[in-house]
Amino acid sequence: IAGITQAPTSQILAAGRRMTLRCTQDMRHNAMYWYRQDLGLGLRLIHYSNTAGTTGKGEVPDGYSVSRANTDDFPLTLASAVPSQTSVYFCASSGFTGELFFGEGSRLTVL
Amino acid sequence: DQQVKQNSPSLSVQEGRISILNCDYTNSMFDYFLWYKKYPAEGPTFLISISSIKDKNEDGRFTVFLNKSAKHLSLHIVPSQPGDSAVYFCAASAGNYGQNFVFGPGTRLSVLP
């Protein structure tokens, strides 16, 4: 069982470019989340989706968009990347227990 | 202002001794708390949780204590093992809803052989 799969594992891109981080889960969880991890700040929620077809804003949503066309996929898009979006991004999902299951992360560097 | 604080960025403990990781929160509405462990280049993994109706929860070598009046929780690891070396995140939520979880900044635990 793969759980949560994220791609790419790491990426360097120029400021102003568009970037989509992919996330797929095989646990049939209803809820999915995107977090960013920055030193000294822990994990901060960017966007979430409680079920396919719905999305919501987290603590730090500006500059990011998400979509949830089906249960398994939850891509995160940076329309025009800026250096402050350099971070490690974690996708997660949760089922009825509420426990969050995380992917292995995508390290993004914006120059 | 951070609602969940882990004031020790790092902690070093000898193998076999007790590790105590602390977490403080400010929001009195928080009623569900979790600890996650993270190894380098991996995603966080769930370790243990506690709801506000309890003051202690044990799972093997890991015990979480909750002091609601002090808005403080702690994770005890006994005995500590080198494989426990990781970053530990405390998280709190009002209700067990994933989008409500607020994470602390983490404490890096090093267990020395």
Image (tube, coloured by chain):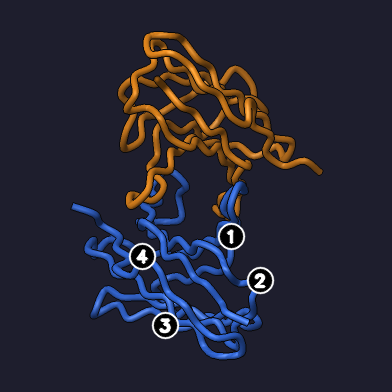
* Badge 1 element: strand
Image x and y of residue A75, in percent: 56, 22
Dot 2: chain letter: B
Say which residue label 3 marks.
B55
Q: Does the rendering let one see residue A31?
A: no
Q: Which circle's residue, 4 or 1, is located before the other in the chain?
A: 4
Please name which of the two marks, 4 or 3, marks the residue nearer to the observer: 4
| Between B90 and B52, the one nearer to me in the picture | B90
Chain letter for the part of the structure drawn in blue: B
Mark 4, mark 1: which one is toward the viewer? 4
Q: Residue furthest bottom?
A: B17
Quickly name the residue at label 2.
Answer: B83
Specify the quadrant that holds the C terminus of chain B. bottom right
Q: Earlier in the sequence, mark 3 or mark 1?
A: 1
Q: Which callout, 4 or 3, points at the residue further toward the start of the chain?
A: 4
Residue tagged by mark 1? Answer: B46
Tell me if mark 4 has few (under 14), some (14-19) or many (20+) residues whose alpha carbon lies within 10 angstroms of its own.
Answer: few
Kindly indicate which chain is depicted in orange in the rendered structure: A
**Distance from the alpha carbon under mark 4 to that under mark 1:** 20 Å
**Which residue bears the numbered disc 4?**
B9
Q: Which label sits in the foreground, 2 or 3?
A: 2
Identity, as a three-letter code, of the amino acid under mark 1: Phe
In what element is the residue under mark 2? helix
